[in-house]
């Protein structure tokens, strides 16, 4: 398998980890906390490290079928007998991901709309209003939006459906913002004192009503799955409810103009804050432009985000026909062989891939609508579970057995031309959790191959399965032992078992092939 790089090319997949072991075993418990997937907790287990500390070894950067002759450039001739660890490719997978295209609109107090990479469905600009517009929210499919006035009146555009309002109802404090539910069948309104009003299928998760505030609440945004929301105050302070996680704020930072609203990026789970002059502040969300510095006929009062949470995938998964021969070649050296599996995020449910809808979470995965965040989380779990199940079946058919199954977790969204993962870290962590559950359910030990940089960008900063780690570094073999004792290079609550270093060419006759270096902690 090769060192993790910014681009791996298109050959990635199930890999063989070959361990030329000396006598003795080292017992380790699962390092770090036992992390639960979003749907199924990982079972705790005592892990047996098959590697002998201090062994060095090598691995192959991609699948290369054994070729005793010299006629096949790159073909593996043999495994070096003086190494402790070797890796060869077994399966490979090609993935091309076209990024999603999130965007946002801003709304002014007169109901005028300003679009940034987003569609225009109409406005209240030029229409006499009883009260000024104070916020907006987009429908989940991005084909419409609602505007809300300070008296709680609602104006619907595009495919936005009216579910009720506070118009005509006496209010303790004026309404200042709104947010839509995950499937667009409801919405919340928020008042300046932090009070919440729920309509349609919107669930109440808490409020700031009755709590003394440094600054008034001015807006809100819901989480991508609709199971929580954020409130924002005029100083940029953030309040979280339900499953909403804090991702940063402008609280305590001097502002040219006060914050007036916020909205969620459905692809990252981050959010934007908008100031009254149209300035945008992004937290785990891309910047697409602002009205900052532009003369406005009325101040900005809100922001609504558009776009799909699902980028476009084109996946192909192929078995390496050389698995059996490579396994036997490794075994002939006296090695104990471990298997390596690549996993990646699934296509959106519109692909109709059966692997999304069968598995431990099949009932949840078939929830209507299939594109809802909750359903896609379940589909992702089943996707990972089914990939791992297929890997187990294929390895058994090839007579390949394993003492550790390593999961290749690399190529985050928008960091390489060969992206394996989409931008939704919750979905991604469910894929990984599903794969882990399948291997553990089959009585297999599981470890993770990645880097401290890539793993949190793929699975999120809070996902911590606490499994053995194979850490890719690209460093020279003499420096590899150092990484075994450096917590800064670990990830996911795991403990280092192997460290991967820089590639080194191997020569057999006129044939040259590449093996990466490895060190056992």
Image (cartoon, rainbow, N blue to C red):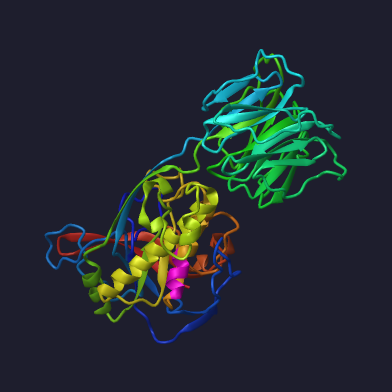
The residue at 51%/27% (across/down) is: 117
In the rendered image, residue 440 lying in the magenta stretch gets the answer yes
Question: Is 1 rendered above or below residue 376?
Answer: below
Q: Is residue 87 left or right of residue 70?
A: right
x 24%, y 79%: residue: 332
In this orientation, which residue lies closer to the viewer: 131 or 177?
131
Question: Is 57 situated left or right of 255 in this image?
Answer: left
* Residue 471 visible, this orientation: no
Query: Is residue 218 covered in magenta?
Result: no
Residue 486 drawn at (x, y percent): 56, 64
Q: Is residue 514 left or right of residue 257?
A: left
Q: Which residues are magenta?
A: 435-441
Above or below, 399 against 131 in this view is: below
**Which quadrant would residue 499 be assigned to in this image?**
bottom left
Q: Position of residue 155 (x, y in %)?
A: 65, 26
Tell me residue 250's x, y (percent): 72, 38
Q: Quadrant of residue 410?
A: bottom left
**Front residue (pair 472, 12):** 12
Q: Is 390 on the left-hand or right-hand side of 157?
A: left
Can I make out residue 356 in this image?
Answer: yes
- At a point 34% along the width and 78% down the height, the residue shown is 20
Q: Position of residue 99 (x, y in %)?
A: 44, 39
Q: Nearer the viewer, residue 96 or 369?
A: 369
Residue at position x 68%, y 45% from top? 229
Quadrant containing the N terminus in the rendered view: bottom left
Q: Residue furthest bottom?
A: 23
129 above or below 183? above
The dominant secondary structure in magenta is: helix
């Amino acid at each position: 398998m090769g060192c993790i790089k910014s681009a791996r090319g298109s050959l990635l997949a199930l890999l063989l980890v070959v361990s030329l072991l000396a006598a003795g075993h080292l017992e380790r418990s699962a390092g770090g906390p036992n992390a639960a997937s979003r749907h199924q907790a990982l079972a705790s287990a005592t892990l047996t490290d098959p590697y002998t500390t201090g062994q060095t070894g090598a691995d192959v950067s991609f699948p290369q079928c054994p070729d005793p002759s010299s006629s096949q450039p790159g073909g593996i001739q043999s495994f070096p007998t003086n190494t402790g660890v070797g890796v060869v490719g077994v399966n490979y997978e090609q993935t091309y991901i076209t990024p999603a295209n999130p965007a946002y609109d801003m709304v002014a107090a007169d109901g005028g709309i300003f679009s940034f990479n987003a569609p225009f469905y109409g406005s209240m600009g030029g229409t006499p209003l009883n009260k000024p517009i104070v916020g907006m929210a987009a429908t989940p499919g991005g084909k419409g939006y609602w505007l809300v006035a300070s008296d709680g009146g609602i104006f619907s555009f595009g495919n936005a459906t009216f579910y009720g309002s506070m118009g005509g109802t006496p209010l303790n404090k004026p309404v200042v913002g709104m947010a839509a539910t995950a499937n667009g069948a409801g919405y919340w309104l928020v008042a300046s004192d932090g009070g919440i009003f729920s309509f349609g299928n919107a669930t109440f998760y808490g409020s700031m009503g009755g709590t003394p505030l440094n600054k008034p609440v001015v807006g809100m945004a819901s989480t991508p799955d609709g199971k929580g929301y954020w409130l924002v105050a005029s100083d940029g302070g953030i309040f979280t409810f339900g499953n909403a996680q804090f991702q940063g704020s402008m609280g305590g930072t001097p502002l040219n103009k006060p914050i007036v609203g916020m909205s969620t990026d459905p692809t990252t789970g981050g959010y934007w804050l908008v100031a009254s002059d149209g300035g945008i502040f992004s937290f785990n969300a891309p910047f697409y432009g602002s009205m900052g510095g532009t003369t406005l006929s009325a101040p900005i009062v809100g922001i609504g985000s558009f776009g799909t949470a699902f980028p476009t995938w084109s996946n192909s998964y192929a078995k390496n026909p050389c698995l059996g021969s490579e396994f036997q070649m490794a075994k002939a050296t006296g090695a104990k062989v471990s298997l390596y599996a690549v996993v990646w995020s699934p296509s959106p449910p519109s692909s109709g891939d059966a692997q999304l809808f069968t598995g431990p979470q099949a009932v949840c995965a078939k929830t209507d609508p299939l594109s809802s965040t909750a359903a896609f989380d379940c589909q992702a779990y089943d996707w990972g579970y089914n990939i791992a199940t297929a890997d187990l079946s294929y390895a058994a058919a090839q007579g390949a057995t394993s003492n550790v199954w390593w999961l290749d977790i690399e190529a985050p969204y928008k960091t390489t031309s060969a992206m394996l993962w989409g931008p939704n870290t919750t979905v991604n962590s469910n894929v990984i959790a599903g794969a882990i559950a399948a291997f553990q359910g089959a009585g297999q030990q599981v470890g993770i191959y990645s880097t401290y940089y890539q793993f949190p960008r793929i699975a999120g900063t809070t996902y911590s399965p606490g499994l053995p780690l194979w850490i890719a570094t690209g460093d020279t073999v003499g420096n590899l032992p150092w990484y075994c004792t450096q917590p800064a290079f670990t990830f996911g609550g795991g403990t280092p078992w192997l460290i991967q270093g820089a590639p080194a060419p191997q020569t057999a006759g006129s044939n040259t092939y590449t093996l990466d270096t490895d060190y056992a902690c």
